[in-house]
Amino acid sequence: MLSQASRLFYKFLTLVACILTVGCAATQGAPNPADPWEGSNRTVYEFNDGLDRAVFRPVSEAYAFITPQPIRTCIRNIFLNLGEIWSGINSVLQQRQFDAINTMGRFLLNTTLGLGGCLDLASANGQPRIPNDFGVTLGVWGFSSGPYMVLPVVGSSSVRDTFGDVGNLVGNQLNTIGYIPNVGLRNSIWGLEFVSRREALLQISETVDRTALDPYSFIRDAYIQQRQAKVLGPEAAADALPNYENYEDIEADDKALNIAPQK
Amino acid sequence: MHTLNRTTNQFHNTDARSHHELRLQRQGQPFSRLMTIKFFLLLALSLMAMQSFAQAKPDANSAPDTFVQAVADQALMVLQNDPEVKKQNIGRINEIVDLYVLPYVDFAKTTRLSAGKYWRQATPEQREQLTAAFRQTLARTYSGALSRIDSGTKMDVQPLRAEPDAKDVVVRSRVMQSQNSQTIGIDYRLEKTPTGWKIYDINVENIWLIQNYRNQFSQQINANGIDGLIAALNERNSK
């Protein structure tokens, strides 16, 4: 435990040094145009991953161990339900009126008959949640994402989404749970929110651990794809299918394709 | 076959206990006639059971959305009723995936597209090894997700939006993993082959599988060549 803490502290020092000097470990090969800051991003990623494995993941696993699944789902649903207000506001800001109406309908149904959001009756009745946030709103308003960024503790982001996250913090946290006057209670609820959010992602991090060749680029590419799809909206995203070129039958010269023959 | 046996037993038990039968016997009805009726009833029942089973078998030449729903329903039915799956037996889940999912997937194409331009450099042996290693990796991804299937899990395919003569389509669906949980959007990309529709890419919550593996593949190939990529996949698989 001690060595783990010291390793984490060491990672933190590297992180500070990196942020101060910008650019640490050089990356292999041609830089990815979507991720020009890959070197420092990887350092922050390493730090986040260490922190996650040392603290957040064990805490979430303990939470999952002592709390039965239906109660965990209920708690998660209550927080998600509270977040619907901010999602709906962003749908309005993006002029996605149908999404806004559906989100409001979900919120009203789940808050009343769904016992404060514990039961997601709307999903069960064919109206799934439409997650939305301020980063997407900025994207819809025409701001390009800018380079990919890994933020300390927060994780995957981009220049645009970092601004979006500030908006989300104000809109989705400070203006809801933040109004609770009792500081102890408020902070405990935020703690529970964080743990329940992490617990819901345990399956995903397990899958990444098991199948990714390089977890960093797996998470990065997934994040970029998902954000792009959200900015485009479901219909446009369905039309903007990835166009994979089939190289099997193409007779092109290797230089044009920028590939060197195998040794 | 399992379902059939169970039906037969239930039928026997309830009937044997039935007061109606006892009364008929007391009234002096010929017992053999009753047996004949029972036999025909059973026959009709089993025929019905067989027919519904045959209908559930996915037909790659049907409409792509019908096909995907049939593949999913069949796999879900097997997974939900297999006692080994409830015990999280990964070996058994892999077997089920091999039997009920992979026949409908064009795995060579998935691998080819993930390798992108590097596919051209690969020798036939490397192509084969890469496909096998990648298939193993993805089977592990799926079996992890599939081990969490319970009786509340269901998948609903959404209406298809495609031209009738399209050769490359996307079938969208929503999966409810368990009771009261949030639904997950899963899309399937299919191509029409001479033998019918084949799935070659899958999208989970806006993340396309091939696109997500392309950078990882090219990174590995740039650093260690195609053999390095195959070795890296196999090393992951053995963990």
Image (cartoon, rainbow, N blue to C red):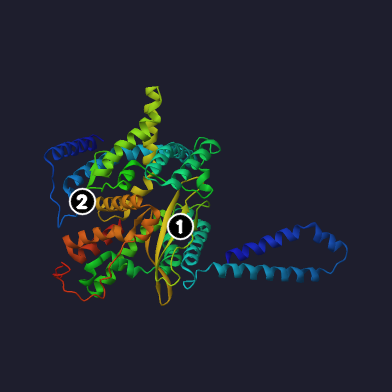
Q: Amino acid at mark 1?
A: Ser
* Residue A177 visible to the viewer: yes
Q: Are marks 2 and 1 in contact (CB under 8 Å)?
A: no
- Residue B91, horizontal then vertical, whole percent: 41, 60
Query: Residue A227 has which mark?
Result: none
* Residue A129 visible to the viewer: no
Left or right position of A247 against A234: left
- Which is nearer the eye, B206 or A241? A241
- Residue B181, horizontal then vertical, whole percent: 47, 46
Q: Secondary structure at mark 1?
A: strand
- In the picture, residue A134 is in which quadrant? top left
- Which is nearer the eye, B196 or B46? B196
- In the picture, residue A197 is in which quadrant? top left
- Residue B96, horizontal then vertical, whole percent: 45, 63
Tell me the subunit letter for badge 1: B
Q: Amino acid at mark 2?
A: Asp
User: Residue at label 1?
Assistant: B173
- Which is nearer the eye, A174 or A17? A174
User: Residue at label 2?
Assistant: A35
Q: Secondary structure at mark 2?
A: loop
Q: Are marks 2 and 1 on the same chain?
A: no
